[in-house]
Image (tube, rainbow, N blue to C red):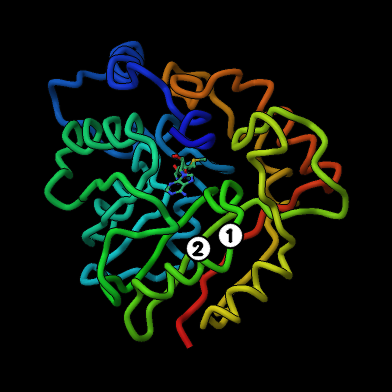
């Protein structure tokens, strides 16, 4: 198991998810809606709200073939499949998250529209030009080789394909507060600046349709969004308050930046 996989692994994830669903007053024997799981399964900065915003920006159509890389529990995939009606394939490094994603796809009745594949972003298990849209949220921070990552994304996209993403980028000074949600220590964190993200994407065959820094917008909204519930990332993220606090402090002090974008194949 790689360092990243170990960092994200959460044993008994299916049992934990089912316990949290029941504690929230939901009945897993009845079909759940993706929205009611939103606080549990959107494992990235800004949660479900950020996924909805990126979905608007990406302008995905029902006929698009979508790949979600580093899909986690596949909350964003279920949002896209249910709101738009598109087919989504998920690639995820962690077997535990794959198992959790399969469970939640079944509980929401979306398993026929969402495929879950254990695999790596750096060696995507799909032929060239298999997708119209690649989607990725809060994953690149764990991947050192950005050229290989964006090369793989470019490879699996067909002509006119789009890459929609959000990431943490490096800020003006080095990250100093650990653990962070994506890295227990600096050895697992591979942040590059927003300029470098744009530049490497350009060299990989993409042009920006939209690329923006949403750090300030995120900081101004986060506190008001929080509502206590058994459905939280804490079901599978150890030490969540400390990690989330460190991420917020890093963002406030400009050590990290939150960026998102939609790039198109040139
Ligand atoms: C912060 S979580 C985000 C999960 C999901 N994208 C979401 O927003 O809900 C990062 C995910 O990326 C996965 N991951 C990290 N490196 C990966 C790689 N090289 N290939 C595939 N998945 C990876 C992790 O296992 C983890 O599930």
Q: Position of residue 251 (x, y in %)?
A: 77, 43
- Residue 206: x %, y % from top left: 52, 80
Residue sitting at 37 percent across and 18 percent down? 11
Q: Quadrant of the N terminus?
A: top left
Query: What SS does tag 2 mark?
Result: helix
Numbered mark located on residue 22 in the image: none
Mark 1 neighbour density, 10 Å: few (under 14) some (14–19) many (20 or more) = few
Give the residue at x 60% y 80%: 202
Q: Which residue is mark 1?
A: 145
Q: Give residue 129's quadrant in the image.
A: bottom left
Q: Is residue 127 left or right of residue 194?
A: left
Direction bottom: furthest residue: 266
Across the whole image, how many numbered discs are drawn on residues?
2
Closer to the camera in the image, 205 or 240? 205
- State the separation of the CA atoms marked 1 and 2: 6 Å
Residue 241 rendering spot, x and y as whole percentages: 64, 21
Q: Identify the residue shown where x is 39% and y is 71%.
A: 59
Q: Are marks 1 and 2 in contact (CB under 8 Å)?
A: yes
- Residue 45's place in the image compared with 172, above or below, is above
Horizontally, residue 68 falls left or right of residue 185, namely left
Which residue position holds label 2? 149
Label 2 CB less than 8 angstroms from ligand 1: yes
The x, y position of residue 162, in whole percent, is 42, 74
Q: Is 86 rendered above or below residue 209?
A: above
Element type at mark 1: loop
Q: Nearer the viewer, residue 46 or 150?
A: 150
């Amino acid at each position: 198991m790689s360092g990243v996989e170990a960092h994200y692994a959460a044993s008994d994830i299916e049992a934990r998810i089912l316990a949290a669903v029941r504690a929230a007053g939901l009945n897993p024997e009845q079909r759940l809606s993706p929205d009611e799981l939103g606080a549990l399964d959107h494992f990235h900065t800004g949660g479900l709200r950020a996924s909805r915003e990126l979905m608007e920006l990406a302008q995905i159509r029902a006929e698009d073939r979508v790949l979600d890389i580093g899909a986690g529990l596949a909350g964003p995939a279920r949002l896209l499949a249910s709101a738009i009606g598109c087919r989504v394939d998920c690639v995820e490094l962690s077997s535990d998250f794959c198992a959790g994603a399969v469970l939640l796809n079944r509980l929401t009745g979306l398993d026929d529209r969402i495929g879950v594949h254990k695999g790596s972003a750096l060696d995507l298990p799909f032929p060239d030009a298999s997708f119209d849209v690649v989607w990725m949220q809060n994953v690149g921070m764990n991947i050192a080789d950005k050229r290989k990552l964006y090369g793989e994304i470019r490879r699996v996209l067909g002509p006119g394909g789009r890459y929609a993403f959000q990431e943490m980028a490096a800020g003006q000074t080095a990250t100093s507060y650990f653990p962070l949600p994506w890295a227990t220590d600096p050895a697992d964190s591979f942040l590059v600046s927003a300029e470098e993200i744009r530049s490497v994407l350009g060299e990989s065959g993409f042009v920006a349709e939209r690329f923006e820094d949403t750090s300030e917008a995120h900081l101004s909204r986060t506190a008001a969004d929080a509502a206590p519930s058994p459905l939280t990332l804490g079901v599978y993220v150890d030490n969540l308050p400390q990690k989330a606090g460190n991420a917020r402090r890093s963002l406030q002090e400009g050590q990290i930046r939150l960026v998102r974008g939609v790039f198109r194949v040139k």
